[in-house]
Image (cartoon, rainbow, N blue to C red):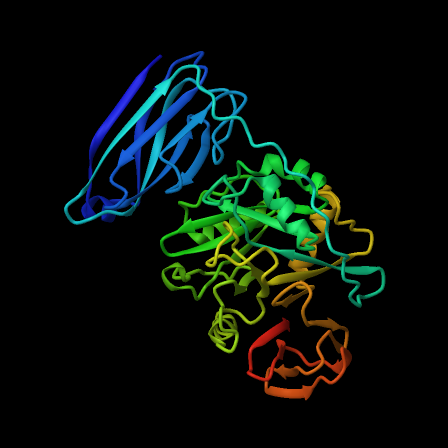
Amino acid sequence: MTVSTHRGSWGPDDRIASRYHYLPVDVPPGADGLRVRLSYDRSQGILDLGCLGPDGFRGWSGGARNTFVIAPDAATPGYLPGELEPGQWYVVLGLVRVPNAGLGYELTAETGSFSPPPPTPAPPVPERPPRRALPAGSDRRWLAGDLHSHTVHSDGAYTVDELAGLAAGRGLDFLAVTDHNTVSHHAALPAAGDRAGIVLLPGQELTTPQGHANAFGDIGWIDFREPPDRWLEEIERRGGLLSINHPIAGEMSWLHPMRRRPPLVEVWHWSWLDQRWTTPLAWWFAWDPTAVPVGGSDWHRPGPDNAPPGSPTTWVECPADAEPTESAPEVLEAVVDGLRAGRVALSARRDGPVLLRQGEELVAVRAAGTTLVGPDGPRARVRDDRARLPAEPGCHRLVDDTGATLALTP
């Protein structure tokens, strides 16, 4: 066994010098495991925690954990299991918030025979509500999903299996699992999706002080420490998609400048609590009106400050043979291709009013009593549960009698 200990204090000058600091740890040949423990006064500041091996990324837990284990066959959620390459490793500390007086810390890293707690057994598969048969193009179907969620692999409360069951029980066909700055959850997605009968889309929420963005696709880890223009370049090279997350959301708003605009924007986030407020739409139109709008619940855990999966719902038009009962590569590809092509619609919930674009027409479903609003303002009252209306270029919305947005389509 080898033990490395680091003690010190981080202050504002350290934070200005670099957001991330790297503490070296020597791992000898043949090490069976690595355990890291971090202690500091959480009432005085916040430190993120992560790990790099000689061959690159080995995990990230942000401020959600103060200890982790990496072993050949298992690892703490957020970290990648596998052989421990001998040589110099680094524990990464992110200085999120440090006081003027300094934030003292102690970090201990040990090599030895360590194993994380065993995983929680998969819960029973829930009964799912019937799928909605929305009008679609020839040989097409609409799949209901959510493009933003978290598990125990970052700061969420549920395992991948528990989250998959929750989303399937709410009638979703697909769910993007987007844990912060890690891809350790990706290995669990296919089996969990198959058990629950839902497509689980691999994702990673690139999380920085200047804003958050989702990387979609089975594309491996994206280095969140790089500038966003580099994210976009690397994600496109690997065949994935980048979405700006909750661009108007208090201290989590998007502040990064970019030379090129990403293809997707999370226009509808759970924090859009008052849908009469049109600022998220104004941001979208000013940033890039050609960006594809998507929605995400950003679900973390049950409670009043968390919207359940599917609130809002992102609908993606896919080939009719894209069967949303398993995370097969062709189904994942169909969802990503639909997002890339902009074949989407957003609604406040899965079973509420939906507005779909079909060629030269708009189809409003379960929308009686709403008003259709186009780029130039109100255009028509919707009097029937299913109505066909002429379409023009640009975003169209269904609003209620208070002006709150219930559904939109680009």
Q: In which quarter of the image is residue 289?
A: bottom right
* Left or right relative to 269: residue 111: left
Q: Which residue is drawn at 44% across and 66% down?
A: 248
Nearer to us in this view, 249 or 283: 249
220 to 248, vertically: above or below: above
Q: Is residue 39 above or below residue 368?
A: above
Residue 21 sits above or below residue 210 on the image: above
Percent of width and height locating residue 265? 54, 62
Q: Which residue is drawn at 70% across and 77% down?
A: 367
Report the side of 217 relative to 105 (left or right).
right
| Quarter of the picture holding the C terminus | bottom right
Residue 391: x %, y % from top left: 72, 80
Q: Note whether residue 201 is visible.
A: no
Coordinates of residue 75 in the picture (x, y in percent): 49, 27
Q: Position of residue 103 (x, y in %)?
A: 21, 41
- Total number of numbered discs in the rendering: 0
Q: Residue at x 45, y 31 (%)?
A: 56
Regarding residue 86, the answer to whether it shows in the image is: yes
Find the residue positioned furthest to the left: 101
- Say whether residue 386 is left or right of residue 347: right
Residue 300 versus residue 281: which sits nearer the camera?
300
Q: In this view, does 206 lie above or below 110?
A: below
Residue at the right extreme, as displayed:
138
Q: In which quarter of the image is the N terminus?
A: top left
